[in-house]
Amino acid sequence: MKDLTQLTAKEINSGIKNKQFKASEVMSSFLEQIDAKDKELNAFITLNDKAMDLANAVDNKIASGEDIGALGGVPIAIKDMLCTEGLKTTAGSKMLENFIPPYSATVVNKLEQSGAIVIGKCNQDEFAMGSSNETSYYGNCKNPWNTDYVPGGSSGGSAVAVAASMAPISIGTDTGGSIRQPANFCGVVGVKPTYGRVSRYGIIAFASSLDQAGPFSKTIEDSAMVLESICGEDPFDATSSANTDLSFVSSLNNDLKGLKVGLPKEYSDGEIDGEVAAAVETAKKQLADLGCEFVEVSLPYTKYAVPIYYIIATSEASSNLARYDGVRFGHRADFKDKPAADLLDFYSRNRGEGFGTEVKRRITLGTFTLSSGYYDAYYNKACQVRRLLQQNFTDTFKQCDVLLSPVTATPAFKIGERIADPITMYKNDIFTTSTNLAGLPGLSLPVALHSNGLPVGVQLTAGAFQESHLLNIAHKLEQSIGFKGEIHS
Ligand code: GLN
């Protein structure tokens, strides 16, 4: 029999429905793969010990002729930012080392309603703050193409789970690039939906005006299927959208003739690796062959995106993370030998032990930018520039249907190379943060292999709620490029 771990979610679902193989066989193949590979890769923090039972339940449904759903029997790996009822959810932090949520995120509920089976919870940067997975309390996750390299972050474990065929699909979150960047570093597809497309209910909050969950997969079609399952209005999230255009899969094969692709001129400024630039050229050539036209566009606020992002995201984080005080939420220090001197001492010991260095840095930064006297100079100013950046994107999408650009200036970097230098690490987010600030959908699609053996992708970005367009273009491009993404190690 074909190696089941190499199949797409779509192939797995139809193979189970057609009785070519069983859901339990699929699940045990993926669990074996995790067993063989994850000691080294460290993509999972927790495995779901109910996964095999749930797969058997799918087989019983098949035996009794019941419908198993569009993702029926498909294992899915979930970033540890999403609450899973009864299954430990750590956000990559010691703060939540023992947290077992009493409920599941809406995304998880919806996936389970479509028949998907949570196989485990994925490693990530602590509270999704990072670009390399090195801030995780649970140790580094490694890039399966070359384990000396980072997988990207913050959703590194979710990207690695798919890249190393330990799950056919996974879920990550993207606040400033955390789906697109690790997808790019690991040679898989990663999609960040429009802000509001996917409910944030039950997703541990980092920066609430930017956070969105989305899929990783080996193909655009699989991501389109996952998105059809997880998008939609949710009474538990007031920012979720009532937009009901979810015809993602049926639009995948639309003709691209006459579509306009915008090339942001500011995205080729600065130091971009020659082979990353070449990958964008390859994509451009393929899109031209598919009948697309090109227009140069200007996004003059690009140079402000990283500073605005790091003001707004840290401000929101400092507020969101205030709840982890060791009383109702989070790690409680051991006060047996040395009782707390006062309430402040109690809080600082809990928070001091529970949070890692990067999270503390962000809380400190965000508390500063929100503090009286600096609020107007930093937070307010950043919100004003964000508004201008958003308007600029709205105007730009009057001239084109989609933007084509690099995801990051270089492929994956080495473990340890940037962690001591936060500014260099933050600059890595130059091409991804604008999309979040403007609330737009974007994706990363693998295109080529770099001469250093690591994958390189391109980023496509569309106007708000234009996911069907975005996925259609990416699907056609994927087919004409034919990047296979097999790891030769
Ligand atoms: N690298 C960015 C950061 O560290 C993005 C994180 C994210 O999207 N969660 O904030």
Image (cartoon, rainbow, N blue to C red):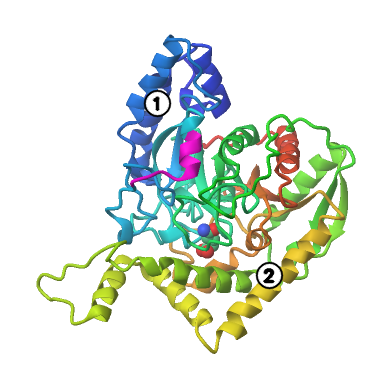
Is most of the magenta stretch helix, strand or loop? helix
Name the foreground residue: 210 vs 24.
Answer: 210
Where residue 139 sits, quadrant-wise, is bottom left
The kind of secondary structure element at disc 1 is helix
The three-letter code of the residue at mark 2 reads: Arg
Which element carries disc 2, helix, strand or loop?
helix
| For residue 275, above or below residue 269 | above
Q: Specify whether 242 is left or right of 13.
A: right
Side of 292 relative to 20 (left or right): right
| Residue 89 visible at all | yes
Nearer the observer, 259 or 268 = 259
What percent of the width, then of the height, locates residue 431? 66, 61
Side (left or right) of 211 relative to 440 = left
Q: Does the magenta stretch include residue 397?
A: no
> Which residue is at 71% across, 69% downward?
387
Nearer-the-camera pick, 472 or 479? 472
Residue 44: name its quadrant.
Answer: top left
Q: Is residue 104 on the magenta stretch? A: yes
Residue under label 2? 386
Task: Please tell me which residue lies in front, 294 or 439.
Answer: 439
Q: What residue type is labelled 1?
A: Met
Residue at the farthest front position? 235
Q: Give the range drawn in magenta.
A: 102-111
Q: Residues within 10 Å of mark 1 (few under 14, many from 20)?
A: many
Note whether 436 is above or below 21 in the view shown.
below
Does the Cβ of the disc 2 residue fall within 8 Å of ligand 1? no
| Residue 53 horizontal/vertical position (percent) | 33, 25
Q: Where is residue 477 in the image (x, y as percent from the top left)?
A: 74, 38
Left or right: where does residue 421 sit relative to residue 52?
right
Question: Could you tell which of marks 2 and 1 lies nearer the N-terminus?
Answer: 1
